[in-house]
Image (cartoon, helix red, strand yellow):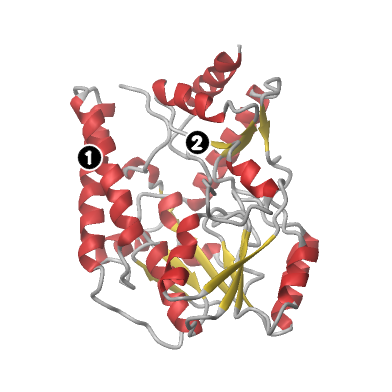
Amino acid sequence: MRRLIGGEFEGRANIPGGEFLGDLLPPGKPVSLWAGASSALRVLFRELGLRPGDRVLFPSYLCPSILAPFRQAGVIPDFYRVGGDLVIDTGDLDRRLKEGSGPKAVFFIQYFGFLQPPGVLAYLREAGRRGFVTIEDGVQSLLSGGVFETGHWGLASLRKWLYIDAGVLVGDLSKFPEESAGVQGYSLYRLYKDLGIRAREIYLAGGPGFFEKFYLNMLKKAEKCYSSYITCKKLSYSDRRKLDRGIGWSGIKSLRRENFLLLERLLEGCRQAVPLFSLDSPDICPLGYPVRVGDGLRDQLRGHLARQGIFCPVHWDLGGVVPSRFEESIKLSGEILTIPLDQRYNEEDMEYTAGQVIRFFK
């Protein structure tokens, strides 16, 4: 059996159990499920009634794909400062809120499973009470306690946690749009992804090297389709059934926390890979183990790990995305690397991964 760490989820990531998605979310908040976070975001865009020329505030550190539906509709994205520690600068945000007639909405992110500090969350709640619409991106923090308790609206994506392409929208919709535009692109995305995942499983089971190249090619094509389709399509029946059977969310959270603590211990003496966070609360469920790698070595380390079968995503490439004045965010985007630690992996996998990181720097 080959060792392959990171990359898209396959069926083994869906740990069965008797817990349901609604158990994770704040009671009393309506939830709707869509065909991926892209669909959920477009539904929210329509619900807010945004128009060309409207201004929306975004953090200076974000996934560029978030901006796509706003820019396509002529909405003006503006930015507020997020520090190198990924904490929102409320002073800068306050100044931005007071500019002109104010933004139509404020988008904020809970990064890597670690929620913003209490003071920042209190400020955001106060901004909501002052009439600003707040959108809480919990894509990376779905399983952490306290998520979606601050914003008027919440967004999540199950494909970051499971082999289920569900976009989650938390908030009370006035209507449920369904459109056909872009459905073909979504269908191609699912086809390419399913073919890629199946080829990955064959390769992991000892299949010939052809399957490795095939699944990587299929997943690359899938991502291209995912970023381009424009539908507000609801979650498919097959994916909804997977959720209705129940998922072992508590087990997933426990395994991820164990792997984080293990990586933290194993990499404690590796000063070249500096962790961004520490697991200091039982409510936290980490998305991965994000580290900063300076001296221009991030991409070299990433390449080394990929050659050893360890695929580490970069969250995110901000080249040309945010204004140059956000130097901390741009610098972080060139140094950050997220080491996989999800529920598919055990202690042996984490020891192998940490060993390869240490080996690179020796």
Mark 1 nearby-residue class (10 Å; few <14, some 14–19, many ≥20): some
Comparing 113 with 284, the one in front is 113
Tell which of 311 and 320 is nearer to you.
Answer: 320
Residue 118 appearing in the image:
yes
Circles 2 and 1 in contact, beta carbons < 8 Å:
no
* Residue 79 x/y as whole percent: 64, 64
Horizontal and vertical percent for residue 222? 28, 49
Query: Horizontal placement of 362 versus 48: left or right?
Result: right
* Mark 1, residue position: 198
In the rendered image, the quadrant that contains the N terminus is: top left
The residue at 22%/48% (across/down) is: 192
Q: Nearer the viewer, residue 193 or 294?
A: 294
Label 2: element kind: loop
Percent position of residue 70, x then y: 47, 71
Q: Is residue 28 visible?
A: no
Could you tell me which residue is drawn at 64 percent across and 34 percent down?
292
Query: Residue at point 50% right, 20% down?
Result: 352
- Name which quarter of the figure residue 216 lies in: top left
| For residue 73, side relative to residue 88 (left or right) | left
Give neighbour class at mark 2: few <14, some 14-19, many 20+ (Cα, 10 Å).
many
Rendered-image quadrant of the C terminus: top right
- Residue 276, relative to residue 271: is it above or below? below
Camera-nearest residue between 325 and 238: 325
Q: Secondary structure at mark 1?
A: helix
Q: Amino acid at mark 2?
A: Pro
**Residue at image location 27% in from the left, 34% down from the top:** 200
Which is nearer the N-term, disc 2 or disc 1? 1
Q: Which residue is mark 2?
A: 340
Which residue lies most toward the bottom here? 174
Q: CA distance from mark 2 to mark 1?
A: 20 Å
Q: In this image, 158 relative to 358: left or right?
A: left
Q: Quadrant of residue 2?
A: top left
